[in-house]
Amino acid sequence: MADLLIEIGCEELPAVACREARAQLPDLLRSGLEQAGLEAGAFETHVGPRRLAAIVTGLPASRAAVRRDVRGPRADAPEQARAGFARKHGLEAADLEEREGFVWAVVEGADTPLGELVGGVVETVVSGLQFGKTMRWPGGRFSRPVRWLVLKIDEQVAEAELLGLWAGEHSRGHRFLGGETRVRSAATYLADLRDVKVVVDEDDRREAIRSGLDAVGSWIDPMGKFDEVVDLVEWPVVLEGDFPERYLVLPDWVVVTAMQSHQRYFPVSDGPGLAPRFAFVANGAAKPEIVIAGNRAVLIGRLEDAAFAYEKDLDLGIEAMAAELGRVSFLEGAGSLADKQVRVRELAELLADRVDAEPGVRPAVARAAELCKADLVSKLVSEFSELEGFAGSVYARQEGEPADVCEAIREHHQPVEAGGVLPGSEAGALLAVADKIDTIAAAFAIGVQPTGSRDPYGLRRAAAGVVAITLARGFELGLPELMSRSVQTLVAQGCELKRKPLESVPEAVEFVLDRVGAALEPEGVSIEELRAARGAGHTAPVPMAALARALRDARGSERLAAVRDAYGRCVRIAAKGEAEMAERFDAALLREEAERALYEQLVATDEQLADCVARRDYACALDATSGLVDPLNRFFDEVLVMDPDLALRGNRLKLVFNVAAAIRSTGDLDQLPGG
Amino acid sequence: MHTHTFQTMVSALQSFWEQRGCVIATPYHTEVGAGTSNPATFLRVLGPEPWRVAYVEPSIRPDDGRYGENPYRFQMHHQFQVVLKPAPDDVQDLYLASLAAIGIEPADHDVRFVEDNWESPTLGAWGLGWEVWLDGMEITQFTYFQQAGGIECEPVSAELTYGLERLAMYLQGVERAQELVMAPGVTYGDVFQENERQFSTYNYEVADTAMLARHFDDHEAEAGRCLAAGLPLAAYDQALKCSHIFNLLDARRAIAVTDRAAYILRMRSVAQAVARTYLQTGEDDG
């Protein structure tokens, strides 16, 4: 049995690339081994800023040869041809066998030593890694340039080439504290690297950082930088610095942002408030006093900037900031931020009507809408973009705006990321939804919607936010109405659209509905159920989600299967007969008992459906449609749809069509897997 | 080791890169917002010919002016720009050695390469790389050029842009750039304070916006004429003038929101046409 070490050495990988690689490495390694025909005892993978590593244990020393029969020329071929064939396979002509009218060579083959296979494993892993962003350099394409490759089978260097680099046994330790080192074997790899000041195992780095921070005191990480820091260092050393207490007069969140954004420092709390101290993680520190002094100076500079900006902003006041918004553009060509605030206010008020908001909420939303973008021209937000929303709420409070208005201003950005905190107040939720819907509608209208992986204005996140908030609050909003209003106001504001007004609205609506799936996936709704629910034609996330959940709950039931089959039959017949279908259904043309019965059931079902759907009770709606199954089956048994009389034929096709339409209000059931 | 003055620090960088085969170029003779815009970078990263250059570039950003009252924000600051084409395999080590050459021994510090990606919509250019941290302070932009003027860079160049004021402040241990020693007995403030005051006043208060808007149109048209005459270098100068005028108009808050995107698109179109013509001209000359 042999152990294998793979180390792919890189220039500093972004933390996000480390995360991507970490998620993919085990599967890629598994498939690399499989393709090479190797079975491993066990393996582990590690990712850090300068290396991707895999330690594989319990590999066979070689892959056993496979004996195979190779067919040669026909049995009656000339002697010369038989000899040539035999030679080709390293055999004598006498060794060939004769079967089925041909000559055969039985090729034993040779075992393939492990050393000749590992290059392919590395190749599979590296070419299979998918990064969100890759770059080219003179030598290849990867997240960042690859600079060395260590490949060892036990104590031996394996021969292989990757991106023009020959595998060796020399790795590189910490840039300044370690230097180059010879790796002895897979078994000693982690220890060999530790000797040159590299903690290869991410969990070890994580623990070292955690215990270092704990030793400093009661540290906090409100902006969630910890995981990133683990991938920014190879030899974590937690250090502590202080700053003048006078900066603590700033709002806590401003101080926290100065520390955490960009610098990734950890604030230290002191009872209820912040302490004038900070902890940070250096990548090794031979002279900690120098490193601390440098970081301290940087933080003080940032706090000084924040304090200066904060005071200037307070002098100016939020009203004056709001008055500046006419000068600031929103997206590229969708008017100014002042224009946007007008649209957001309109939408928020319309929404407040649609969701029947509490009476007190409406004035708060309207006022918050007038101020929500003002902090974009504040000095504080231009220094620290993360304070968008928060800064506005603080400045609004300073000018005596009521608490609910300030809250709504702060919350209108939420959620700032997938799965992030949602607005806590109804006013904040309405404003957040209005803001995001307007952004999406405007972006599509001026033709800057996302393409492929490019989403420069964060529209996917905005759409996911709309879905998350509306589902959490049960807001039922017709997206086409809201988005059309946005676009119409955009036009009234004199904005030149790149497309015909409103042409973009259906696409923008679909774009938002596309995000419902991701929101429901954790609840166990399948792709098929989601597609089926989508097919019911809803233009709001709430009813679409309610229907998808009802379909999930009914999954596997015989009743649902029967309705699905009946529906499928109707859809196919209606589609085939589309050209001959009557424009309107005419009850006077009903002749047979079975078609009359079906029609009567349809009328009754339609009524029940309207009632269930109005209550968004889709379990009840699914029940209602199942009443159509028997009459429909009888109809198909007893009635000839394609009657020679074209009037009857057209009318019957229309009846079938109407039955399909009724069932479709509980989903395009054809999307569900068949029984 | 003695502490560098601003100018001995610059000459140490120049001599370091000169020894590594760089042409030591001069700052460009018209205003640029960054050393990247100097044709010694923007045009030379195009095409296959190897190229190594290093130069100081005064970076003119009208909207960053603070009348000389801010400790580190100016309408003109200084960059030290290095372009290595193709990017050598040991480019990071070379960079770190250059820090040692100005008295920053990496082993004494926490020097880090932290992801940073660069994009210039007006140049149609982008690249991936890092910002380099020295004990938490960003001192250099390090970029592998992927595209310039909308054209893929082949081979890929490495671009190093040192922020000279920041580096010097760190080396000299001063908190305000104005206090930096330029030469014995002469401070940065002595040399630049009055410039900052006058140019901030001009940029924010005096510049004739109607005239500037006309000049933008004129320079844009002239760029087109130069391109038609097969003179991409001359056209590029006109493009740079457009870019500076745009920055001035922006500082004067004279660009209507609805026009902004159009201005940027116009500048990018010229930059891309220059890049294409530059490559064609190079090919025609063999």
Image: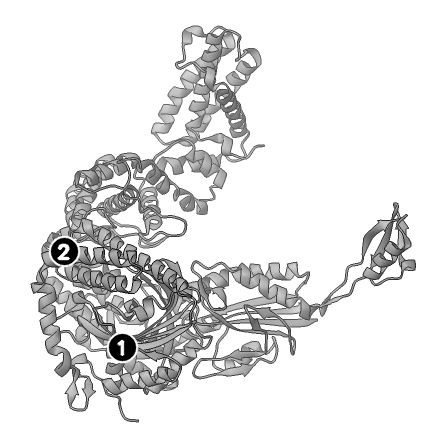
The C terminus of chain A, quarter of image:
top right
- Name the residue at 42% across, 80% down: B93
Q: Label 1 amino acid?
A: Thr
Q: Secondary structure at mark 2?
A: helix
Q: Chain of mark 1?
A: B
- Name the residue at 46% across, 12% down: A650
Disc 2 crowd rating (10 Å Cα; few below 14, some 14-19, many 20+) is: few
Q: Secondary structure at mark 1?
A: loop
Residue A653 vertical position relative to residue A55 in the rendered view, above or below = above
- Name the residue at 88% across, 45% down: A101
Sequence-first disc among 1 and 2: 1
| Residue furthest to the bottom | B1
Residue A109 is left or right of residue A235, and the answer is right
Residue A561 is left or right of residue B221, and the answer is right
Q: Which residue is mark 2?
A: B214
Q: Chain of mark 2?
A: B
Q: Nearer the viewer, residue B15 or B48?
A: B48
Which quadrant of the structure image shows residue A561?
A: top right
**Can you give x and y, in whole percent of width and height, for residue A168 in the image?**
59, 77
Residue A674 vertical position relative to residue A196 in the rendered view, above or below = above
Disc 1 crowd rating (10 Å Cα; few below 14, some 14-19, many 20+) is: few
Residue A222 vertical position relative to residue A633 in the rendered view, above or below = below
**Can you give x and y, in whole percent of width and height, for residue A53 in the image?**
54, 70
Q: Which residue is mark 1?
A: B26
Residue A564 is left or right of residue A394, and the answer is right
Is residue A524 visible in the rendered image? The answer is yes
Q: Label 2 amino acid?
A: Arg
Q: Nearer the viewer, residue A290 or A134?
A: A134
